[in-house]
Amino acid sequence: MDDSNLRDILQETTAAFIDNNTQAVKQKDPSLFSAILTEDCIRSYRPKSFVARYPEFFKSQITNADYEAQMQLDLQTMKDVTQNVTRTLIDTTERAAVIWTEQTITMPDGSTKSVEVIWDLSFTQDGTRVKRILEFVDTWESTKVLETVLANAA
């Protein structure tokens, strides 16, 4: 496979990853989060200090099944999400992509929260599935969102 074909495939898989994350919230269907992931895909979060602060939300590594179970609960605290992709880097040699997004999360009460997320994705050899996710979260804004979720859950 030449690099231009692989680049197109990686871009399509990257776009599907973002769309699946958006549709999972809109449809309240956590299985969509894993739709293009390999069965053994591992998701990790950064920065580590943020992960350590919220152990009830984050583990150092999480499987698809664990993520879907977590999101089944979290989806109840979100009415909608929109994602503005501000930057995408595709590396055909490493079969990887880095995606910068600005997410606007609409809460059940109609209020909104904005969070920046950077996803570092690794793909299968053919580029059609994601096999590893490293997610960097906007800790300042995410803390506000998580504190709201914790307050609503209490």
Image (cartoon, grey):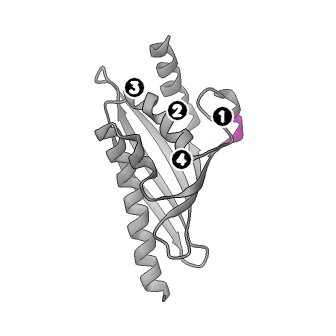
Report the residue marked by disc 2.
Answer: 142
Residue 108 rendering spot, x and y as whole percentages = 31, 23
The residue indicated by pointer 1 is: 50
The image position of residue 36, as x and y in percent, is: 44, 59
Q: Which residue does the image show at 55% across and 70% down from the upper left?
A: 124
Residue 96 locus on image (x, y percent): 56, 68
In terms of sequence position, does the residue under pointer 2 or pointer 4 come before the other?
4
User: Which callout, 2 or 1, points at the residue further toward the start of the chain?
Assistant: 1
Outermost residue toward the bottom in this view: 2
Q: Nearer the viewer, residue 117 or 74?
A: 74
Q: What amino acid type should be assigned to the residue bearing mark 3?
A: Thr
Magenta region = 46-51
Marks 4/1: CA distance? 21 Å
Circles 2, 1 touching at the beta carbon (< 8 Å):
yes
Q: Nearer the viewer, residue 121 or 126?
A: 126
Rounded to the nearest angstrom, the CA distance separating label 2 from label 3 is 14 Å
Structural crowding at the residue carrying mark 3, measured as other residues with C-alpha within 10 Å and reported as few (<14), some (14–19) or many (≥20): many
Alpha-carbon span between mark 3 and mark 4: 20 Å
Q: What residue is shown at x 36% (from left), y 43% (from top)?
A: 24
- Counting labels gives 4
Q: Nearer the viewer, mark 2 or mark 4?
A: 4
Question: For this view, does 26 lie left or right of residue 138?
Answer: left
Q: Residue furthest top?
A: 154
Q: For numbered disc 3, what is the local secondary structure?
A: helix
Q: Residue 64, labelled with which disc?
A: 4
Question: Label 2, label 1: how many angstroms apart (C-alpha)?
Answer: 9 Å
Identify the amino acid type marked 1: Phe
Residue identified by numbered label 3: 77
